[in-house]
Image: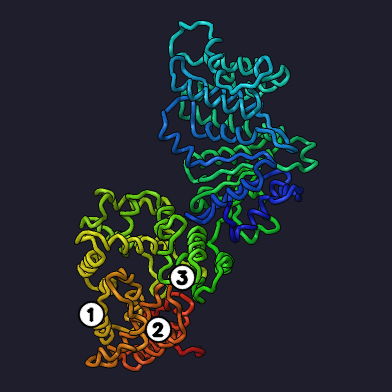
Amino acid sequence: MQSPLYARDPILRGLVPRLVGMAPDRRELVPQEHRDDLPVTLLSGAHGMGRTAVLDALDAFYRGRIPLGRVDAARVEQAHRSGPAAANTSAVVEMLEQLACGLAPAVPGAVRLRFSRLLPGLFAVSSWHRGDEEQQALARDRIARLLVACGLTKGAGGTEGDGTDWTYDVSERLADPDRRQHDLAPVTEAVVQQYFGRHTRTRAEKAVQQWYRDRSSGSDDGEAALIRLSLRFHQGGDFQDAVERTLTAAFLEDVADAYGRWQRVNRAPRPLVLLDNAHTAAGRRFVGLLLDHRSTSGSGVQDPLVVVATRLGGGASLYPDATTRELPELTHASGWERTVASSPSAGMLTVPLPPLGRADLLLMLDAAQGPLPRHLPSALYSLTRGHPQGSRLLCEAVVRAGDGVDPEALLDLPVGEGRPVGEVLLERLVPQPQLRAHLAPLALARDRAAAQVLTTAAVLADGGLPGAGLPTAARYLVEEHWTDGGQDAAGGDGPGAEPGFVADPFLRALLVHEARRTCAAAEPGRRWADLHGLLRQHHEERGAGHEPDVLRHELAVGDAEPVVSRLTEYFGSWPADRWLDALPHVASAPHPPLAEWTDHRAEIARGARDHLYEEADDIHRSVNRLLHALWYLSETYAEPMDDLCEDIGSELAFLSMRHPSGRVVLNEAARSWPAAVRERRPCPTYGPDYGRGPLRGEE
């Protein structure tokens, strides 16, 4: 059973039904949008934003009700790269084949797509060099699939076949078996003649041959044009590119022919193509060919093909004239129009898929039978930032666990197979095991220079990437769009909001959690304290200005007392604005593994352990309480309780009376920080000139 999708109804029940002309959940026609010219709808978003899930839902809605073709461009590209470099195939040809096989089968009550132009072209370019068994096997399988999908497998006696003997019949047609082994033209000629002889009528054959002849200067007839098409395709390079344009045009014009004037007047539901991973080279190429054809003047009647594609990341630079719409804008109309007639990218409607909202997480938790901790929805949202896949899996784990859920242990909740949900999520977001092992410790680093320290010191888990691991990891984060991490709708990453080497906050949280888990059983030199010790030493060597990073890694191993002492020392010698900037950054330190450390932060923040610091002065004790309050409340699972938030303001107000020159700045922080922490926003910062200008309200 397919999981429900949240916050995607403007696409699933708004835009696509209007483009197709049919309701998603009942056989009812709806008014069609964009009568003469259709956009390619591109859904963009990061990993786990539900791009493929939207296509899955559309597939479930419309398969068997309208002609529907679906292709995963990433799989096509992977198969094309890992398979043999056969001259009679390409990623575009394979995608056209898959789409034709999906769209051609008869659908009750829908227009039947025949692909009278595309099929002879695909058959022609699939021709093989004589003696090349690999090419012949590829052609045999492709031709068989197309014949079956298009209902063309009946033999001379009217019996059904599977099409696999088609290429053997071609071999028998070759008049001279002693010709040179690598001749391609005779095979193509036999393929073309057999196709027309078996599968077309005279009138249709003439029209199709004339179509190819018009696109091949110097060809005497349609058969010669198709033979030339095949020869050029096998040449590769620019010649193959030109052939792919011709085949794409044949595909789209076949669809346009099937939906003639009568179907358009009666608003027959349009066919649907779902194209996943259009950010790959194969996907970009196919979408580009489609957009080019639609923008070409004189291309005839526009095709009625509804195309919904997905793309990892954005795409503004690739499609500069595209129209961009936010999801809520699509509820009643897309508002798309081709703004630049001659621009291919003007035929694109891009729709970024945003994170889910807090209300969506509440809906996901509705299935829980018993009461849940009151702060749990906020904790889930702070952890996932509305990441759809992460939110869904975590909410399912919460519902399954019942009322025994501890927000602190969200990532350790078991999923269906009994494994912790944090591990399962990380595997889905970073599928390569070696890369996961490499990224987990690197997520502790602030930047690339700090990450290099961990790599150089050979502290990565066994099986990690070798010497070139850091460039590989950094390139992966860029290519997979994990570098766009940052802020949620509420404003950010909590009191110590700062990106690290892994910028995306949700992925970073999963990786840090994995680092805690793996470090517990690691060899000396690779444990939690060892990693942070290396990073602390690295920042010490960087000199003045890096003191907050030094303290942050010291705090990450649970050694708070020296950190408090240093912050107390800096309080008396640093300007107040610098000290305030450093404090949240230090407090953003990840806590140590719970097996090695007991969490008393909330107690210390409330002053319950002040008796342990009788010899310290008031400033030291205040800094101690303030640091532990900020450190505890920086956790995604921590409830920003009113007393702790107000205590932050009280401590800052106390300190404002004791700083040599920073009373104004500290006073302002005392007023603004409690609200920022309560709302999980980064704490405001104040430059060195804050408070030196006119007073508020003065000119």
Are discs 1 and 3 less than 8 Å apart at CB? no
Front residue of 120 and 214: 120
Distance, label 2 to label 1, CA atoms, is: 30 Å
Q: Which residue bears the numbered disc 2?
A: 690
Badge 1 marks a residue whose secondary structure is helix
Tell us which disc is closer to us: 1 or 3: 3
Say what amino acid the circle numbered 1 marks. Answer: Pro
Q: Position of residue 89 (x, y in %)?
A: 49, 28
- Examine the rendered structure and indicate whether residue 455 appears above or below residue 263: below
**Numbered disc in front, either 3 or 2:** 3
Residue 383 in picture, x, y percent from top left? 45, 67
Q: Amino acid at mark 2?
A: Tyr
Q: Relative to 341, is 190 above or below?
A: above
Drawn side of residue 151 relative to residue 584, left or right: right
Name the disc covering residue 405, or none. 3
Q: Quadrant of residue 189?
A: top right
| Cα separation between marks 3 and 2 | 45 Å
Give the colour scheme shown: rainbow
Q: Measuring 57% from the left and 23% from the top, which residue is drawn there?
A: 123
Which residue is denoted by mark 1 in the rendering?
562
Q: How many marks?
A: 3
